[in-house]
Image (cartoon, grey):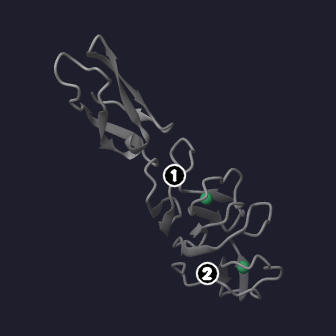
Amino acid sequence: MSSDGRYVAFASDAINLVAGDTNGARDVFLFDSQNNTVRLLSKSQQGLQGSAASNNPALSGNGRWVAFASDATNLIFGDTNAFTDIYAVDTVTGLIKRISVTSSGDQANNPSFKPAISQDGRYVAFESTATNLIPGVVRAITVNSGGGGAGYVTPPTVTITGGGATANATAVANVANGAVTSITLTSGGTGIMGRQ
Ligand SMILES: [Ca+2]
Ligand SMILES: [Ca+2]
């Protein structure tokens, strides 16, 4: 509910709150207690109904922004991650944005849940099991002992210790004449701040 009590955001399976709700899926709505009207919010900017369920709306204190979680894949262009994402709708302009993306706009690699939104709508907090939303920070690269004797017969495995996008990174030891000559660190496409 908005701070002034005028607006309430809610999720509903009902199909008769607005005309033309034929998606057969739960949607997010906004009730205006002053005008006694209900609007459907979980739709694309072009007016497409959500292709799957939307849930967990959170309304900014000023009543303008609504954040929610959705399984729909058609609320914005390019939602191809097949995971639940967090969206925010500007109830004044109808602008809808996907929130659960990296700072460079990459999609999350796992689902996101339970949005909360600040009084002015600027900040949205949410839970996510995605591992790529923040850049990775490599804390250690460990060359695992292998082969023994006079050097490496085959390249040893390499372990990365860190957080964030390091879960999507790989490290490979390059071996020449039985010795490790270099380690090739490859990020998962979302950036790694290397610390070696
Ligand atoms: Ca519906
Ligand atoms: Ca998605």
Q: Are marks 2 and 1 in contact (CB under 8 Å)?
A: no
Image quadrant in which the N terminus is located:
bottom right
Ligand 1 image-quadrant field? bottom right
Name the residue: 53% across, 70% down. 60
Graded by Cα atoms within 10 Å as few (under 14), some (14 to 19) or many (20 or more), the crowding at tag 2 reads: some
Vertical arrangement, residue 42 with respect to residue 158, above or below: below
Name the residue: 67% across, 87% down. 34
Q: Position of residue 121 (x, y in %)?
A: 53, 63
Vertical arrangement, residue 75 with respect to residue 194, above or below: below
Q: From where the camera sits, is residue 67 visible?
A: no
The one of 25 and 35 positioned closer to us in this rendering: 25
Tell me the SS state at disc 1: loop
Q: Amino acid at mark 1?
A: Asn
Find disc 2 in the rendering and name its residue: 11
Residue 35 image-quadrant placement? bottom right
Image quadrant in which the C terminus is located:
top left
Name the residue: 61% across, 81% down. 11
The circle drawn on residue 109 is 1
Q: Amino acid at mark 2?
A: Ala
Q: Position of residue 137 (x, y in %)?
A: 33, 38
